[in-house]
């Protein structure tokens, strides 16, 4: 039995008010709130267990290192990875994808090679590839979504040419909520020898993930969206791809020996982790993932599917509101515009006065906004602690916005 | 004391107790703003630093400061209407002396005045002051 009220009690911020109204936090797609055990882990990390990792032989350094390194096993379990050495720590998906762009793609690709992207990618899965386009002459090949926001896996596979060196695609759209059939894409791509990078920044929050079942080569996650600390995260990299990579960032921790004219690397995954990392953040992420797995990813997915259906039925009743992304099995992420009048910023300003936090703007998806022909949308994105009563508050606030702006 | 047009708004606001009515009035003022000719919406009049699109076209006529403005966001357009009442028709030499933040603060629209807000009110005020300084 999924008891959302019990879960809400684990998140202290959810009991606060904003603008004199109880907080209705529907901006989980941007960043999720943190349960008390994560906050406690961060506090304890600094108050009782802090030292740099991998460096000292003293008690606290060993303790911090054990805690920090132990998170690799937790992430591997969370992602269904066979080997925790395939987990590289990052500050989030943006860093993970940049690592692949600089460390892998720059080595493997040359001018004229092609990278296939869907039109609904987040800028984190676009801009690093634009760097390669600008610097190396790599070609970006775009695959459209249909009017419901569905991405046809076959259209992605049909875009493969002899020059295709990578497919980089999100598993869940941060704007449309579309769930992409990455498994079919990976199977088809693998048959043609094309590696696949999956942006799991949104997906891993809302559904069970198993990278071996998906069959991808890279899978990036973002800690702060997973109820963990900001600037925590990881990317899973299949061993065969990791062996093809050169280090991206240079510094301490990622080297074995450094001399004036010679350098040798540490073993993966540390080969890709330069400098003192976010030690406490990463420890907090481990606690957050254990918390999610304790509740059960299947249970979280089921709760959010109910919220999605409830929200959809309520929003469908507002004939002056247009929802972008209408696939049946989408994640509980709703981007919308109001007919006729009302900029996304107007709507979010009025919603905020009612205590409802949503995102307004372009959501870091320029090509998708071009595709939809929109300047900006409002987005309500749900998490494990949201309730149907909060959906009702959202709808009431939207009705007020419609009245004021109409 | 600001210009009469603005003091009239202050008076009206005093009768409006809840924020919904105040917002309603700001939005209505935006709708009532003289339309800005599309030909004036060019890169030079676009105010950067606003999350929504904002244009301001300023001019001086017989020693007095004038401007036209528009935005695709209705609350922002209402804020432009307030600025219009505050600045439009002022002797050019008086523009720099207007404390727009303090005046708008008198309306209880504090949430639009902080540096973090992305509605670009500060950028708009800056543009007006710069243009008036010639």
Image (tube, coloured by chain):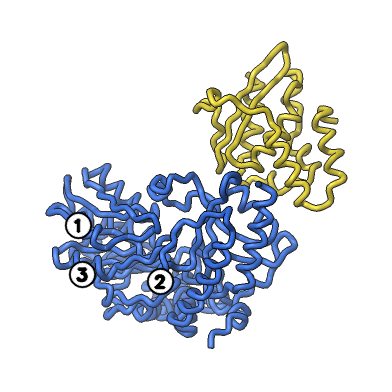
- Whichever of labels 3 and 1 marks the residue nearer the N terminus, that label is 1
Kindly identify which numbered label has been placed on residue A204. Answer: 2
Q: In this view, does A374 lie to the left or right of A132?
A: right
Task: Please tell me whether mark 2 or mark 1 is closer to you in this view.
Answer: 1
Q: Where is residue A227 in the image (x, y as percent from the top left)?
A: 51, 71
Chain A shade in the render: blue
The residue sitting at the top extreme is: B62
Q: Position of residue A363 (x, y in %)?
A: 47, 53
Kindly identify which numbered label has been placed on residue B6. Answer: none
Residue at 66%, 66% (x, y): give it. A393
Q: How far apart are marks 2 and 3 (CA)?
A: 20 Å
Q: Mark 1 lies on which chain?
A: A
Which residue lies under the disc numbered 1? A158
Q: Position of residue A153 (x, y in %)?
A: 27, 63
- Whichever of labels 2 and 1 marks the residue nearer the N terminus, that label is 1
Q: In this view, does B133 lie to the left or right of A239?
A: right
Task: Determine the secondary structure under disc 2.
Answer: helix
Residue at 28%, 55% (x, y): give it. A101
Task: Determine the secondary structure under disc 3.
Answer: helix
Kindly identify which numbered label has been placed on residue A187. Answer: 3
Q: Position of residue B13 (x, y in %)?
A: 83, 43
> Is residue A55 or residue A126 the one in the foreground?
A126
The residue sitting at the left extreme is: A162
- Whichever of labels 2 and 3 marks the residue nearer the N terminus, that label is 3
Chain B shade in the render: yellow
Task: Please tell me whether mark 3 or mark 1 is closer to you in this view.
Answer: 1
């Amino acid at each position: 039995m999924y008891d959302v009220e019990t879960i809400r009690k684990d998140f202290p911020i959810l009991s606060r008010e904003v603008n004199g109204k109880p907080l209705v936090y529907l901006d989980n797609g941007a960043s999720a709130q943190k349960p008390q055990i994560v906050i406690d882990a961060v506090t304890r990390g600094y108050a009782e267990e802090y030292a740099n990792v991998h460096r000292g032989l003293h008690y606290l350094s060993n303790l911090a290192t054990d805690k920090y390194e132990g998170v690799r096993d937790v992430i591997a379990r969370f992602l269904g990875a066979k080997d925790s050495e395939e987990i590289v720590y990052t500050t989030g998906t943006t860093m993970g994808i940049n690592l692949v762009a600089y460390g892998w793609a720059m080595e493997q690709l040359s001018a004229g090679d092609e990278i296939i992207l869907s039109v609904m990618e987040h800028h984190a899965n676009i801009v690093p590839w634009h760097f390669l386009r600008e610097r190396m002459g790599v070609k970006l090949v775009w695959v459209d979504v249909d009017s419901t926001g569905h991405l046809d896996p076959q259209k992605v596979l049909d875009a493969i040419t002899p020059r295709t060196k990578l497919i980089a695609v999100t598993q869940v759209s941060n704007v449309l909520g579309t769930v992409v059939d990455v498994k079919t894409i990976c199977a088809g791509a693998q048959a043609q020898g094309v590696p696949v990078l999956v942006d799991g920044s949104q997906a891993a929050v809302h559904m069970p993930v198993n990278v071996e079942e998906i069959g991808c080569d890279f899978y990036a996650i973002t800690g702060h969206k997973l109820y963990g600390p900001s600037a925590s995260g990881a990317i899973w990299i299949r061993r065969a791809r990791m062996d093809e990579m050169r280090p991206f960032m240079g510094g301490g921790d990622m080297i074995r020996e450094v001399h004036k004219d010679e350098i040798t690397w540490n073993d993966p995954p540390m080969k890709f982790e330069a400098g003192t990392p976010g030690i406490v953040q990463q420890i907090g992420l481990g606690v957050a993932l254990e918390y999610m797995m304790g509740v059960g990813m299947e249970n979280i997915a089921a709760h959010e599917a109910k919220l999605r259906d409830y929200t959809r039925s309520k929003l469908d009743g507002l004939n002056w509101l247009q929802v972008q992304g209408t696939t049946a099995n989408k994640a509980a992420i709703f981007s919308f515009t109001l007919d006729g009048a009302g900029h996304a910023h107007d709507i979010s300003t009025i919603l905020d006065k009612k205590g409802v936090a949503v995102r307004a703007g372009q959501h870091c998806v320029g090509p998708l906004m071009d595709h939809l022909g929109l300047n900006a949308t409002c987005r309500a994105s749900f998490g494990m602690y949201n309730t149907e009563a909060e959906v009702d508050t959202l709808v009431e606030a939207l009705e007020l916005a419609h009245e004021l702006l109409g | 004391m600001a210009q009469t047009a603005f003091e009239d708004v202050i008076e009206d606001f005093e009768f409006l107790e809840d924020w919904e009515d105040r917002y309603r009035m700001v939005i209505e003022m935006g709708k009532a703003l003289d339309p800005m000719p599309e030909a004036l919406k060019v890169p030079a009049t676009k105010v950067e630093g606003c999350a929504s699109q904002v244009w301001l076209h300023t001019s001086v006529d017989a020693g007095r400061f004038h401007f036209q403005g528009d935005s695709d966001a209705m609350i922002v357009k209402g804020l432009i209407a307030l600025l219009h009442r505050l600045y439009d028709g002022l002797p050019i030499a008086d523009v720099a002396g207007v404390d727009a933040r303090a005046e708008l603060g008198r309306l209880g629209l504090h949430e639009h005045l902080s540096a973090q807000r992305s509605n670009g009110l500060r950028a708009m005020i800056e543009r007006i002051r710069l243009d008036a300084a010639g």
